[in-house]
Image: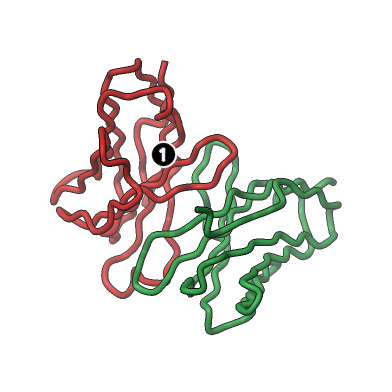
Chain colours: A red, B green
Amino acid sequence: NAGVMQNPRHLVRRRGQEARLRCSPMKGHSHVYWYRQLPEEGLKFMVYLQKENIIDESGMPKERFSAEFPKEGPSILRIQQVVRGDSAAYFCASSPAGRQGLNQPQHFGDGTRLSIL
Amino acid sequence: DQQVKQNSPSLSVQEGRISILNCDYTNSMFDYFLWYKKYPAEGPTFLISISSIKDKNEDGRFTVFLNKSAKHLSLHIVPSQPGDSAVYFCAASRGNFNKFYFGSGTKLNVKP
């Protein structure tokens, strides 16, 4: 499967624990985006990364949330000390590098559904 | 601040008829618009896009219309099929910025 791969598909955490969500972009894509979807709402942009660089993190809460896209391996969205309000579906998308990535659709994974007990 | 709005949460259409989904935006700097389709428990799937230099783009049964003066776009599906039943999201971006702004979605039900 050459699509965007996210794991786990479902993640249950208790309040105060850490959540780690992983995303492997489509083959040949080096731009990764994370979005969050709350129930009955649209997707909200969180962060845009290229390999080893955060390009835009304007949609990500300043506290408890962090993202990385290392030279090797998947992109990771980390949420520390989770709270009930973090319960949502988190989607990762990818696009090609350079000008090929501009005005091009982003391709989405199937998401991670995070539930906080 | 919701920059992309889909004011109809749901739409029901008979199979074979036209489905028209609407989307409004507030940011005049947006220059690239897309429609995504989403089934439950899956990620959004890209359907069709349009750049602001055009006012219409067609792909098979799907046509997107852009009215820049009204800051409005619409997706037409003709003829509608039961397999088109899903949630449809419109999205927009501007210039060299790669982040997409999404509407809240319209749930389309195509009745056989």
Give the quadrant of the C terminus of chain A. top left
Could you tell me which residue is drawn at 46 percent across and 74 percent down?
B29
Please tell me how crowded label 1 is: few (under 14), some (14-19), or many (20+) other residues with Cα within 10 Å. Answer: many
Tell which subunit mark 1 falls on: A
Could you tell me which residue is drawn at 50 percent across and 53 percent down?
B1
Where residue A116 sits: x, y (%)? 41, 20
Left-right relation of B43 to A54: right
Q: Above or below — where is A81 with respect to A93?
A: above
Query: In the image, what residue type sits under mark 1?
Result: Tyr
Q: Return the residue at label 1.
A: A90
Q: Nearer the viewer, residue B51 or A57?
A: A57
Where residue A76 sits: x, y (%)? 25, 40
Where residue B26 sits: x, y (%)? 56, 65
Quadrant of the image occupied by residue A67: top left
Left-right relation of A60 to A112: left
Q: Label 1: state its secondary structure.
A: strand
Could you tell me which residue is drawn at 58 percent across and 47 percent down?
B38
Could you tell me which residue is drawn at 85 percent across and 60 percent down?
B17
Specify the farthest residue to the bottom.
B53
